[in-house]
Amino acid sequence: MEKIIKAEKIKKAFRTEELETWALNGVDFEVSKGEFVAIMGPSGCGKSTLLNILGLLDNPSEGCYWLNGTDVASFTEEHRTDLRKGVIGFVFQSFNLIDDLNVYENIELPLLYMGIPKKERKERVEAAMQRMDITHRSKHFPQQLSGGQQQRVAIARAVVASPEIILADEPTGNLDSKNGIEVMELLRRLNSEGTTIVMVTHSQRDASYADRIVNLFDGEVTVETKNI
Ligand code: ADP
Ligand code: MG
């Protein structure tokens, strides 16, 4: 099956003047188109570092990364930004919504960056709000919403540009159990509709929604298991 993500021997060092931390120590990681993969492991094991590299938000210190078959090392910064906009949608634990923009405007933002005309923006934002069941809150600001609603807005913002891949970093980490399950059901639905999903989690419950679980410990892949 076609690999949408293929990373080989990825290493990442964070350096300050007196300190060097190796967050990743040679990670091999592949994802097939349409898969739902969970990266699991304890706090500090390198999950976010790996996800940020996969999402082109950061560069590895060593190793190779092919996105959709293209070696991203050869890309300029500008080319990476373009690629990210078209291919990848990010969802974070802390929602990362903009406080001064209402729900509609938050979801519209990626389309504005992409230069999509107003009429099409409206259609796409409305469709995304409907999919995430947040239409009735379109004029509300993030502080006026529950955590679960804020994460649904963040997912709507991630999917509005129809990315091939959703990368989610502890998407239920700030939610209670009921809202967490709702968010996981939404991610599973997006996956069943064709979106490839890579999710970072330390929750066994969340990982059970994935097709495959990759365990990370101290910057290395330890075990891989398949959910049947
Ligand atoms: P996780 O998401 O699994 O909790 P991270 O990927 O955030 O782990 O961090 C892995 C390791 O790298 C940790 O030791 C962390 O302190 C370190 N680290 C992460 N980001 C930075 C950074 N920007 N500067 C220095 N060290 C960092
Ligand atoms: Mg993290």
Image (cartoon, rainbow, N blue to C red):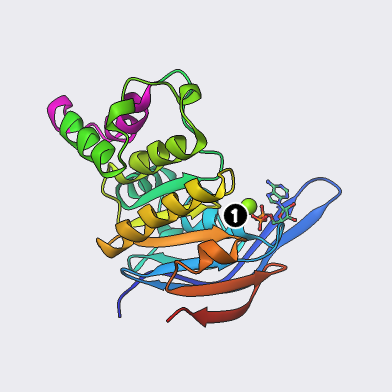
* Residue at figure coordinates x 41%, y 39% from the top left: 154
Residue 76, placed above or below residue 12: above
| Whether residue 133 is situated above or below residue 55 in the rendered picture | above
State which quarter of the image contains the C terminus.
bottom left
Residue placed at 60% from the left, 61% from the top?
203
- Which residue is the extreme one toward the front? 178
Displayed quadrant of residue 220: bottom right
**Picture quarter containing residue 101?**
top left
Read off the residue under disc 1. Answer: 48
Q: Does 154 lie within the magenta span?
A: no
Looking at the image, residue 188 lies above or below residue 131: below
- Main SS of the magenta segment? helix
x, y percent for residue 213: 52, 73
Q: Residues within 10 Å of mark 1 (few under 14, many from 20)?
A: many
Residue at the spot 54% in from the left edge and 59% down from the top edge:
200
Percent coordinates x, y for residue 81 in the rendering: 39, 44
* Residue 192 percent location from the top left of the image: 28, 64
Q: Residue furthest right?
A: 18
Residue 171 in sight from this viewpoint: no
Ligand 2 within 8 angstroms of badge 1 C-beta: yes
Quadrant of residue 100 within the rendered picture? top left
Closer to the camera, 98 or 22?
Answer: 98
Query: What kind of element bears circle 1?
Result: helix
* Depth order, front residue of 92/80: 92
The answer to whether residue 44 of the structure is visible from this angle is yes
Vertical side of 124 occupied by 17: above or below: below
Region in magenta: 102-120
Q: Position of residue 71 (x, y in %)?
A: 40, 65
Left or right of residue 174, residue 150 in this image: left
| Residue 159 vs residue 7, the one in the foreground | 159
- Residue type (three-letter) at the residue carrying disc 1: Ser
